[in-house]
Image (cartoon, rainbow, N blue to C red):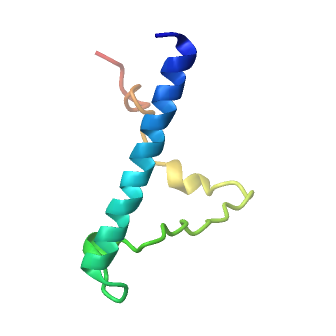
Amino acid sequence: MSQQEEMTAMQQRIDELAQRVGHLEQAVDQLWGSGRARPGGRSKEPSRPELVTIPDTPYDNALWTDSDDEGLGARDRHAP
């Protein structure tokens, strides 16, 4: 089988899979009805996460007073 034939066969399988997923989604919609919430709180359409604005102002240095450097240990002690 040539590479072109393999690519054509693969595309047909992908199209078939997409069609079957569409049928499955329709079956689930019929089972749950359009008005009922789905398990896990998932809705029919995926929701976009709310954007969070991060300010450009520097962080307060008091946030770091008792912190250790990750993997390096505390500042006043030596590594083993």
Please identify the residue farthest to the right as the structure is shown: 56
Please identify the residue farthest to the bottom as the structure is shown: 35
Compared with residue 60, is residue 10 higher up or lower down, i.e. above or below? above
In front of the other: 66 or 15? 15
Q: Residue at x 55, y 66 (%)?
A: 48
In front of the other: 68 or 29? 29
- Looking at the image, residue 70 sits to the left or right of residue 8; the answer is left
Q: Quadrant of the C terminus?
A: top left
Compared with residue 24, is residue 78 higher up or lower down, i.e. above or below? above
Q: Residue at x 61, y 65 (%)?
A: 52
Q: Residue at x 45, y 39 (%)?
A: 14
Number of labels in the image equals 0
Could you tell me residue 9's position as x and y percent?
A: 47, 27
- Looking at the image, residue 4 sits to the left or right of residue 13; the answer is right
In front of the other: 71 or 76? 71
- Looking at the image, residue 9 sits to the left or right of residue 42; the answer is right
Compared with residue 17, is residue 33 higher up or lower down, i.e. above or below? below
Could you tell me residue 4's position as x and y percent?
A: 57, 17
Could you tell me residue 27's position as x and y percent?
A: 30, 69
Q: Residue at x 36, y 69 (%)?
A: 26
Please identify the residue farthest to the top as the structure is shown: 2
